[in-house]
C-alpha cells in the first residue's frame, strides 16, 4: 500500500512537501500485547502511538547492530520480511485545524509486482528482485501526480495539459493514437491503407511526441471456424516498420509502405500515406486485419514501449471479385459450385442451417439476384450494392465482426445463406439464378448445384 497524496482546505499534503507531514508504516503481531515493537494496540493511547510513530521513521528501520549499536541483529525491515501473522497500518498526517464538516481527500495505491529473477532465492528480497515492484510504485505516484509534474500541489506554468485551468490527476502514459485505417479488398488481395495521425501523438506524461512505428496484424486462414475465435490470440504480426537511424528498435524506415503522395478515397477526406498489400489470399474467406502504432517508451522511467490496441482497430476482410462493369465479358457465377453441405468456411454453430454460405460473384455494383428451383419455382430475392457489408445473413452475425461496418467486401460478391425468403431450408439439387443489373436493366442467368 502506498500513500500518494492528500488534499484538504489547507492545500496539498505529502511528506516530500513538508517536514511536519509524515506517512507512517506500522505492523503488529496478531494478538500480541507484550512484544516491545510489534505489539497490538488495545486502547486509544496505543492506537494513537501507532498512528503517529511509524516504524519507517525509526533509526532501526534499515539499520542493524553492525551499523548502529542501538539496533538489534536485524533491521525492522529484515524482521518484517520473515514469516509472521501481522496486521499492517499506513497512516498519514497531521491534518491541522480539522473541524466538524471539514473534508480530507486521501489517495492510496495498492501495489503489485512480480519478482524479477536474479538467480537468488526469494528470501534475498534484494533491490534487483524488487525492481519491477518498485517501478510499479513509481508509476502509481506518477499517474496520481498527473499534471502536477513537480508534485507541489499547484498548477504551475506549462502544466495545464488539457487547458481546463484545473490540476488534473490520475493521468497514465498512453500509446500513440490509433492509425486511421482503410481496408480495400480485390480478387485474392487485401490492401491496407493508413494515415499518419499517430505520428503527432503527444504522450500525456512526458509531453513529447514519442511515436516510433507501425505494426500490421492479420489472422490465419480459417481462424474464425477452426476454433473459438479470440482476436487477441489470433491476430499475428505480419509486418513492422519504424523510424530509421534513431537508435531504437529495428530502424527499418517506412520506405516499403510510404506513398509518394497521400491517397484519398471518394467521400473520405482522410489522407492515407501508407499502403501494405497482402497477396495470394483466398476469395470468400474471412481475414481479420489490424494496424497499430507504438512509441519508444521511456527507459529512464522504466516504461516499456506502448502500442495501440489491435482489437480497437480491426477489420474483417473478404477478398473477391470487384463490381462487374460488363456482364457479357465477366459472367456472374456462384461458388463453391457444387455447394457441398458443411463447406469448410462455415464452421460449427448452434444455428447450423441458418449459417450456411454460398457466394454470388462477378455482380454489378447495383443489382437484384433471383434464385429459382430447376422447375422455375421462386425461392429468394437478394438486393446487392457495392457497399455490401454481409449483415443480411446469419453467418456474419455468428462468425464475423460485431459491427457490420468493420466487414470489408470487394463490391462484386454477395453471400447467400441457402434459405428461401420464408427461411426454409432448400433441398439438394440444381438451382437457377438470374442477375439483373439495376443500372442497365440487363439480365444474366446461371446455375449452381447443392449436394447434401
Image: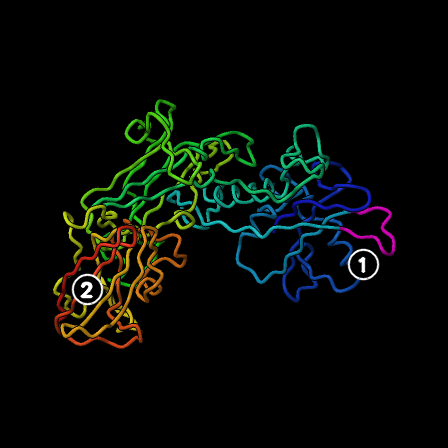
Residue located at (16% from left, 60% from top):
445
- Residue drawn at 27 percent across, 49 percent down: 410
How busy is the neighbourhood of tag 1: few (under 14 within 10 Å), some, or many (20 plus)?
few
Q: Nearer the viewer, residue 206 or 450?
A: 450
Is residue 99 located in the magenta-colored stretch of the structure? yes
What is the quadrant of the C terminus in the image?
Answer: bottom left
Q: CA distance from mark 2 to mark 1?
A: 91 Å
Q: Is residue 397 above or below residue 2?
A: below
User: Number of labelled discs?
Assistant: 2
Question: What SS does tag 2 mark?
Answer: strand
Q: Position of residue 279 (x, y in %)?
A: 20, 42
Residue at image point 39% right, 41% down: 181
Answer with left or right where residue 441 lies relative to residue 266: left
Could you tell which of marks 2 and 1 lies nearer the N-terminus? 1
Q: Can you name the residue that lies furthest to the top here?
A: 245
Dot 2 surroundings within 10 Å: few (below 14), some, or many (20 or more)?
many
- Give x and y (percent) for residue 366: 30, 53
Extreme residue in the front direction? 441
Q: Which residue is mark 2?
A: 433
Q: Nearer the viewer, residue 33 or 442?
A: 442
Region of the chain picked out in magenta, as a range? 94-104
The circle drawn on residue 302 is none
Task: Please check the rendered image and state whether residue 341 is part of the magenta-colored stretch, yes or no.
Answer: no
Is residue 412 shown above or below 295? below
Choose between 26 and 180: the one closer to the eye: 180
Residue 107: image x %, image y %? Answer: 67, 50
Q: In the rendered image, which residue does mark 1 sit on?
A: 45
Q: Secondary structure at mark 1?
A: helix
Front position in the image: 179 or 241: 179
Q: Quadrant of residue 416?
A: bottom left
Horizontal and vertical percent position of residue 80: 58, 52
Magenta: main secondary structure: loop
Amino acid at each position: 500500500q502506498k500513500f500518494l497524496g492528500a488534499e484538504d482546505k489547507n492545500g496539498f499534503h505529502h511528506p516530500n512537501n513538508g517536514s511536519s507531514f509524515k506517512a507512517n508504516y506500522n505492523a503488529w503481531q496478531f494478538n500480541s500485547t507484550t512484544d516491545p515493537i510489534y505489539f497490538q494496540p488495545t486502547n486509544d493511547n496505543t492506537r494513537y502511538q501507532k498512528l503517529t510513530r511509524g516504524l519507517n521513521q525509526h533509526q532501526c528501520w534499515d539499520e542493524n547492530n553492525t551499523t548502529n549499536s542501538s539496533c538489534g541483529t536485524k533491521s525492522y525491515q529484515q524482521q518484517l520480511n520473515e514469516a509472521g501473522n501481522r496486521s499492517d497500518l499506513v497512516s498519514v498526517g497531521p491534518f491541522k485545524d480539522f473541524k466538524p464538516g471539514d473534508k480530507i481527500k486521501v489517495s492510496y495505491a495498492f501495489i503489485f509486482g512480480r519478482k524479477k529473477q536474479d538467480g537468488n532465492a526469494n528470501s534475498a528480497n534484494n533491490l534487483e528482485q524488487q525492481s519491477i515492484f518498485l517501478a510499479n510504485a513509481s508509476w502509481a505516484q506518477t499517474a496520481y501526480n498527473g499534471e502536477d509534474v513537480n508534485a507541489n500541489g499547484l498548477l504551475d506554468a506549462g502544466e495545464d495539459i488539457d487547458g481546463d485551468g484545473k490540476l488534473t490527476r490520475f493521468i497514465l502514459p498512453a500509446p500513440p493514437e490509433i492509425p486511421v485505417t482503410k481496408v480495400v479488398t480485390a480478387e485474392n488481395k487485401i490492401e491496407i491503407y493508413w494515415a499518419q495521425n499517430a505520428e503527432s501523438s503527444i504522450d500525456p506524461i512526458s509531453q513529447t511526441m514519442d511515436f516510433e512505428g507501425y505494426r500490421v496484424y492479420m489472422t490465419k486462414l480459417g481462424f474464425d471456424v477452426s476454433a473459438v475465435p479470440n482476436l487477441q490470440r489470433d491476430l499475428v504480426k505480419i509486418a513492422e516498420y519504424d523510424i530509421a537511424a534513431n537508435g531504437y528498435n529495428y530502424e527499418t524506415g517506412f520506405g516499403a509502405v510510404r506513398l509518394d503522395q497521400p491517397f484519398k478515397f471518394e467521400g473520405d477526406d482522410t489522407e492515407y500515406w501508407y499502403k501494405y498489400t497482402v497477396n495470394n489470399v483466398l476469395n470468400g474467406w474471412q481475414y481479420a486485419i489490424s494496424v497499430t502504432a507504438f512509441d519508444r517508451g521511456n527507459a529512464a522511467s522504466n516504461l516499456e514501449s506502448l502500442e495501440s490496441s489491435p482489437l480497437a482497430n480491426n477489420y474483417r476482410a473478404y477478398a473477391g471479385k470487384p463490381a462487374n462493369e460488363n456482364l457479357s465479358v465477366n459472367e456472374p457465377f456462384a461458388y463453391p459450385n457444387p455447394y457441398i453441405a458443411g463447406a469448410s468456411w462455415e464452421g460449427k454453430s448452434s444455428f447450423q442451417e441458418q449459417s450456411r454460405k454460398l457466394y454470388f460473384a462477378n455482380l454489378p455494383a447495383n443489382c437484384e439476384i433471383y434464385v429459382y428451383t430447376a422447375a422455375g419455382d421462386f425461392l429468394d430475392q437478394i438486393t446487392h450494392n457495392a457497399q455490401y457489408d454481409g449483415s443480411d445473413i446469419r453467418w456474419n452475425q455468428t462468425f464475423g465482426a460485431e459491427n457490420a461496418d468493420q466487414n470489408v467486401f470487394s463490391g462484386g460478391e454477395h453471400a447467400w445463406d441457402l434459405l428461401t425468403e420464408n427461411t426454409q431450408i432448400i433441398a439438394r439439387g440444381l438451382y437457377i439464378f438470374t442477375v439483373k443489373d439495376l443500372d442497365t436493366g440487363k439480365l444474366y442467368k446461371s446455375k449452381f448445384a447443392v449436394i447434401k
